[in-house]
C-alpha cells in the first residue's frame, strides 16, 4: 500500500535568478503516485539533460538510465514530488534508513538525499528548496540526526542552495565515477 501525504505550502520566489516581481505560489509536496512514475522519470531526465555534454557518452548513458529508474528505488526510499498547478514541477529521492541501502554510501543512521530535480520551466521559484525542506522535515520526524547528499561543481545552483541550508563538505565520502569527476559529499546535522 502506498501512503501519500499532501502538504500544501505557499512559498515566495527565492530562486537564484532575479525576477521582475515576487509572487506567492501554492505548491503541493507529496509522495509520488504509482501512476505517475513514468512522468517522474521523464522529469528527472529533462532536469539533468543539461549535464550530458560534460560526460563521455557511455558514462552519460549509464547515469541517465540510473536516474530514470525510479521504480527500483521505491522499496527503500521515498520518492517525493512537488506539484504546481496540477503539474509535476520537481522531485527528490529520500533514503531515511540508509543502513538497508548501499545506494547512498552513507554511514548507518544517516539519511541520504538523492536526485533533486526541478523541471526547467519551474526553476527559480523555490521548489528545490521546498523539496529539500520536506526531506529534512521527514528526517527530523523519523529521529534522523544526520543527512548526506552528493553533488558536483557543475551543479552550482543546487550546491549553493545546500550550503545556504547549512550543509557542509565531508570529503571523506567523495567518490570519482570518472577520473576527472569528483562527486562531492555534504552533510547536515539536524
Image (cartoon, grey):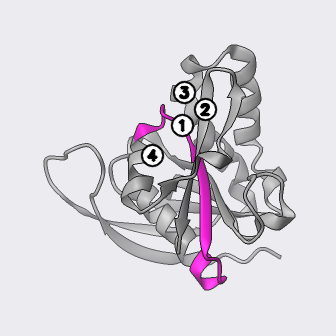
Disc nearer the start of the sequence (1/3): 3
Residue 183 location, quadrant: top right
Residue 7 image offset from top left, x and y in percent:
50, 77
Q: Are marks 4 and 1 in contact (CB under 8 Å)?
A: yes
Which residue position holds label 4?
Answer: 159
The structure residue drawn at horizontal position 79% and vertical position 60%, both measured from the top left corner, is 74
| Label ID, residue 152 | 1
Residue 134: give its label.
Answer: none
Instruction: Tell me, yes or no, whether the two marked residues, 3 and 2, touch with CB atoms within 8 Å.
Output: no
Task: Give the distance between the C-alpha atoms of the residues marked 4 and 1, in whole angstroms.
Answer: 7 Å
Q: Nearer the viewer, residue 178 or 130?
A: 178
Are the residues flagged by discs 4 and 2 in contact, CB closer than 8 Å? no
Of mark 3 and mark 2, the one earlier in the sequence is 3
> x, y (%) of residue 14?
28, 57
Point out the tag, 3 or 4, that comes first from the N-terminus.
3
User: Would you say the residues marked 1 and 2 are in contact, meaning their CB atoms lie under 8 Å apart?
Assistant: yes
How busy is the neighbourhood of tag 1: few (under 14 within 10 Å), some, or many (20 plus)?
A: some
- Image mark for residue 182: 2
The earlier-in-sequence mark between 1 and 2 is: 1
Return the disc, 4 or 1, that comes first in the chain's sequence.
Answer: 1
Q: Which quadrant is the N terminus positioned in?
A: bottom right
Residue at point 72%, 78% (across, down): 3
- CA gap, disc 3 to disc 4? 15 Å
What secondary structure is marked by label 3?
A: helix
Q: Nearer the viewer, residue 77 or 89?
A: 77
Q: CA distance from mark 4 to mark 2?
A: 13 Å
User: SS for tag 1?
Assistant: loop
Question: From where the camera sits, is residue 86 visible?
Answer: no
Residue at the spot of label 3: 51
Q: Is residue 27 above or below residue 18?
A: below
Q: Quadrant of residue 2?
A: bottom right
Amino acid at each position: 500500500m502506498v501512503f501519500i501525504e499532501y502538504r500544501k505550502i505557499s512559498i515566495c520566489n527565492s530562486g537564484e535568478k532575479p525576477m521582475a516581481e515576487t509572487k506567492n505560489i501554492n505548491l503541493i509536496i507529496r509522495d509520488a503516485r504509482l501512476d505517475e512514475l513514468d512522468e517522474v522519470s521523464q522529469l528527472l531526465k529533462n532536469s539533468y539533460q543539461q549535464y550530458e555534454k560534460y560526460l563521455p557518452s557511455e558514462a552519460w548513458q549509464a547515469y541517465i538510465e540510473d536516474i530514470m529508474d525510479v521504480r527500483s528505488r521505491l522499496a527503500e526510499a521515498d520518492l517525493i514530488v512537488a506539484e504546481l498547478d496540477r503539474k509535476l514541477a520537481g522531485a527528490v529521492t529520500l533514503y531515511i534508513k540508509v543502513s538497508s541501502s548501499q545506494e547512498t554510501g552513507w554511514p548507518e543512521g544517516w539519511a541520504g538525499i538523492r536526485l533533486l530535480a526541478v523541471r526547467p520551466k519551474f526553476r527559480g521559484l523555490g521548489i528545490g528548496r521546498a523539496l529539500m525542506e520536506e526531506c529534512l522535515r521527514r528526517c527530523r520526524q523519523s529521529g534522523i540526526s544526520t543527512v548526506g547528499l552528493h553533488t558536483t561543481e557543475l551543479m552550482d545552483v543546487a550546491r549553493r542552495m545546500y550550503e545556504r541550508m547549512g550543509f557542509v563538505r565531508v570529503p571523506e565520502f567523495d567518490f570519482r565515477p570518472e577520473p576527472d569527476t569528483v562527486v562531492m559529499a555534504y552533510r547536515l546535522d539536524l
